[in-house]
Amino acid sequence: MPLFHLQPGTLDDTSWLQPAGHIWTRSTQSWFPLPKDALCYEAQPEDMLPLVRAWKFRAGRGNSARATMLAQNIAPQMSAGLADGRNFVRVHSFAPIADASSQVLILGSMPGNASLRAGEYYAHPRNAFWKIISTLLEIDAAASYESRVAALRKQRIAVWDVLESCTRATSLDSDIEESSIVVNGFAEFFRAHVRVQTVCFNGAKAEHSFRKHVLPGLTAFGDIGYHRLPSTSPAHAAMSHAEKIEAWRVVLDRARGGVSRCK
């Protein structure tokens, strides 16, 4: 992390102070008017670089040589620090795609930023999840999200994530801060979905997090089988698309068989 040395002073003269943006504006006091031309975020922004760029622009167009110097020397260090993964923010996962007929549960780790923005599971265009599922279920990969979700339900396939929330810098599983992990309520889920007999992990991080943070508390559900599948993330390029499809066929096989667990 870059080390900044700030000279102590006062704000007796605020004429030079021009904030480029405001965060956590949902807590703004009613008597404080937010500038119309400033970047405003209701909470912690996922990407701080727009604020850095706005700050550089404001400082660069001003008359203060010192402000320009700061923009030229400090802002690039801030940008580098953010790009290196030090801009950690807390993210939250979605409600599960599931109903009473679900027999297989596919678990990821945490939705990526593209998915969080879209409000949809596996929304990144390079993630192979929907391409693989579309091939297995023989549906149109270009169909609406609602149609693809309905196809999963029809085939008794549920989708969820191991983590309810975590702190991370990017969508990469390797950037998840382990100490920040909060897992979803799986005991309640399995009690409500008694037909689920198989859990398939979409990648190593999902399996690792589940076995470390969840499985020790699921002693009452010892009849559930677990399978780790190759990750559909574009970051996992060790297997071809065809090989991943073959590995993922276990999802359809298990969804078309099985019986209810005892409540």
Image (tube, grey):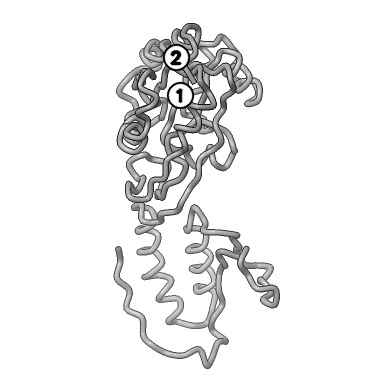
Q: Position of residue 19 (x, y in %)?
A: 55, 74
Q: Which residue is mark 1?
A: 106
Outermost residue on the bottom side: it is: 12
Answer whether residue 155 is visible to the viewer in this image.
yes
Task: Please give the name of the residue rendered at 37% of the width and 18% of the height, measured from the top-left corner.
Answer: 223
Above/below status of 245 relative to 172: above
Answer whether residue 132 is visible to the viewer in this image.
no
Q: Position of residue 61 (x, y in %)?
A: 54, 74
Identity of the amino acid at label 1?
Ile
Q: Position of residue 100 (x, y in %)?
A: 58, 20
Task: Please give the name of the residue rendered at 53% of the width and 91% of the height, measured from the top-left corner.
Answer: 13
Task: Please give the name of the residue rendered at 55% of the width and 64% of the height, measured from the top-left corner.
Answer: 23
Task: Please give the name of the residue rendered at 41% of the width and 11% of the height, measured from the top-left corner.
Answer: 250
Q: Are marks 2 and 1 in contact (CB under 8 Å)?
A: yes
Q: Which residue is mark 2?
A: 251
Number of marks drawn: 2
Q: Position of residue 157 (x, y in %)?
A: 52, 18
> Based on the displayed image, in which of its 4 quarters is residue 40 positioned?
bottom right
> Which mark is on residue 8?
none
Secondary structure of the residue carrying numbered label 1: strand
Mark 2 or 1 closer to N-term? 1
